[in-house]
Amino acid sequence: MKVEENKVVVFHYTVNEGGEKVESSHDRGEPLAFLVGKGALIPGLEKALTGREAGATFSVDVAPSEAYGERRDDFTQRVPKKYFRDADHLKPGMLTVLSVSGGGQRQVTVQKVGSSVVDVDLNHPLAGKTLTFDVEIVDVRDASPEELAHGHAHGAAGHGHEH
Ligand code: ZN
């Protein structure tokens, strides 16, 4: 069975940037499962997976436009400290999480810490970077009707919500 839209692909990956490891599913001990064609994977990786079968291993370079986008120099914001749960420990260069209106959270990079406000860079930490993915496809399977209805993969290796 080949990776294509509405199949679930289960894979291990290691992502490197500039020769340094960024993260790896091997560190978590279990592969990721994704429902293909739902926009949950970065486009360049989904493209590279498509058409391959279980057991395939490959390496692919993904340009920023196919990964986390280009960096925007003006994508910064001054935010009151109360919006950070770890406000007392922030230092320039640190990654932290900012609660955003609507209830979501966003990973940001601290630029400058003032007495009551923090300047943050809202670019994704991997924006502007070409990423190299080393991938091993563990399994390709049909999505269940429930997975198709929800638009994501289930199971221990899927996105972790409970049913
Ligand atoms: Zn679900």
Image (cartoon, helix red, strand yellow):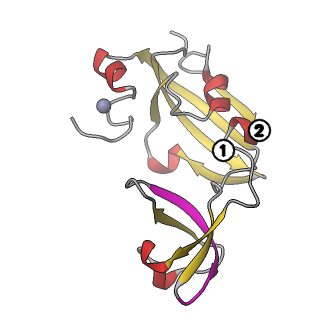
State the residue position of label 1. Answer: 68
CA neighbours of label 2 inside 10 A, class few (<14), some (14 to 19), many (20+) = some
Placement of 71 over or under 39, stated as above or below: below
Quarter of the image holding residue 142?
Answer: top left
State the residue position of label 2. Answer: 63
Residue at the image position 33 percent from the left and 26 percent from the top:
150
Q: Is 112 colored magenta in this rendering?
A: yes
The image's mark for residue 151 is none
Q: Is 5 colored magenta in this rendering?
A: no
Classify the position of ligand 1 by quadrant: top left, top right, bottom left or bottom right: top left
**Residue 135 at x, y = what percent?**
62, 33
Q: Which secondary structure lies at badge 2?
A: loop
Going from N to C along the chain, the mark reached first, 2 or 1, is 2
Q: Amino acid at mark 2?
A: Ala
**Residue 10 at x, y = what percent?**
47, 28
Q: Which secondary structure lies at badge 1?
A: loop
**Residue 134 at x, y = what percent?**
66, 37
Q: CA distance from mark 2 to mark 1?
A: 9 Å
Q: Which residues are magenta?
A: 105-115
Quarter of the image that includes the C terminus: top left
The answer to which of 120 and 26 lies nearer the viewer is 120
